[in-house]
Image (cartoon, rainbow, N blue to C red):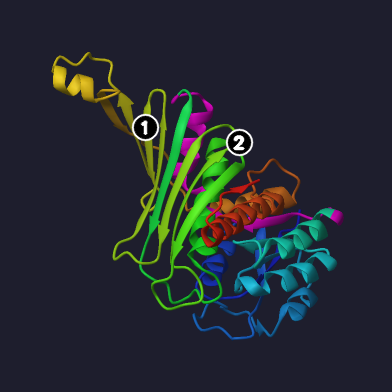
Amino acid sequence: MANLRAGLLGVGMMGRHHARVLRDVDGVDLVAIADPGGDPHGVAGGLEILPDIDALIAAGIDIAVVAVPTRFHEDAALKLAEAGVHTLVEKPIAHNVEAGRRMTDAFASRGLVGAVGHVERFNPALQELRRRLEAGELGDVFQIATRRQSTFPARIADVGVAKDLASHDIDLTSWVAQSEYKTVFAQTAHRSGREFEDMITVTGRLANGVIVNHLVNWLSPMKERVTVVTGDRGTFIADTSTGDLTFYANGTIPLEWDTISSFRGVSEGDITRYSYAKREPLKVEHEAFRDAVLGKPSDLVTMEQGLHTLAVVEGAVTSAATGVSTTF
């Protein structure tokens, strides 16, 4: 069977990583790259840099990756859908829910694979975490809290920290817990003088009753990407910067120090740091996209799922502006 012919739209900060990985995925050939801004990172290799999406489609591609600024996602995706090209769009799916819905409908109506690049789902720590939660190793899940903090990224100009970063946490939380969001309440801050927020805190509850909390900003001098899941039997901590997963078990040894025993609801138990294969998340994501296009089982992030994530993000931003929680 011939390899899938892949095209890439956009070779900026994220696009250059897509170009590298696409060249390393079995069953896929990167045959065309388009970017009206040229090739500042020198990722084209021997390929010509095409001027726009129309030229990319004319190259006769089977699949496409869209890695341009969010405001251009809809136009590119709708043209690719019309041309019958299976497409992976970087997150967030679109600049607003209405555009995302048009994109989702366009691919669904043509029977095409439409995907969104929520790459954190493919992080080895989160994949291992989800597997262990699904196996019941934590018992009932009570709470999921995430922290995603870093310095301000020069690459982002058209969205705030909610759509750029909080969308990661909202998607991965829903995926790990296997439940959609029911309600969110949020607060934002604008400290860098931009139109968009650079700090957001979100609290809420999933449909299955799990309490969630997300702390996200571009105002920290360090980089932190942590997911903490607390349940019946202890707490999992997934560090997606390193791909590590650690389990803090509730203690089984009775406490004899009365002061501490009366203060704590649970006691400290064993701490386990798991060992497992750690593959590059972006490559695993592209393999899932390939498999979905070929009709094989896949953990792909569908456009429908990406649309729900965007709706939750927009609901959080609306909550911050109005002071009222948003229900889905």
Viewer-proximal residue among 80 and 140: 140
Q: Position of residue 19 (x, y in %)?
A: 57, 69
Q: Is residue 74 shown to the viewer in this render?
A: yes
Per the image, label 1 sits on a secondary structure element best described as: strand
Front-most of residues 266 and 292: 266
Tell me residue 75's x, y (percent).
Answer: 74, 73
Where is residue 33 shown, x and y percent of the image? 65, 76
Q: Is residue 282 visible?
A: no
Looking at the rendered structure, which numbered label has been put on residue 207? 2
Q: Are marks 2 and 1 in contact (CB under 8 Å)?
A: no
| Residue drawn at point x = 61 percent, y = 36 percent | 207
Q: How many angstroms separate mark 2 from mark 1 (CA)?
A: 21 Å
x, y percentage for residue 102? Answer: 78, 62
Q: Reply above or below: 163 against 178.
A: below
Asked whether residue 111 is drawn in magenta, I would say: yes
Residue that extends furthest to the front in the rendered view of this protein? 323
* Residue 69 in the image: above or below residue 241: below
Give the residue type at disc 2: Ala
Instruction: Give me the disc on residue 290.
Output: none
Residue 250 quadrant: top left
Q: Nearer the viewer, residue 5 or 10?
A: 10
Q: Residue at x 39, y 66 (%)?
A: 218
- Dot 2 or dot 1: first in sequence order is 2
Which residue is found at the position 45% from the left and 24% from the top? 137
Q: Which residues are magenta?
A: 109-138
For badge 1, the amino acid type reads Thr
As drawn, 152 above or below 88: below
In this rendering, position of residue 162 left or right of residue 266: right
Crowd rating for badge 1 (residues with CA inside 10 Å; few <14, some 14–19, many 20+) = many
Above or below for 299 versus 132: below
Return the residue at label 1.
235
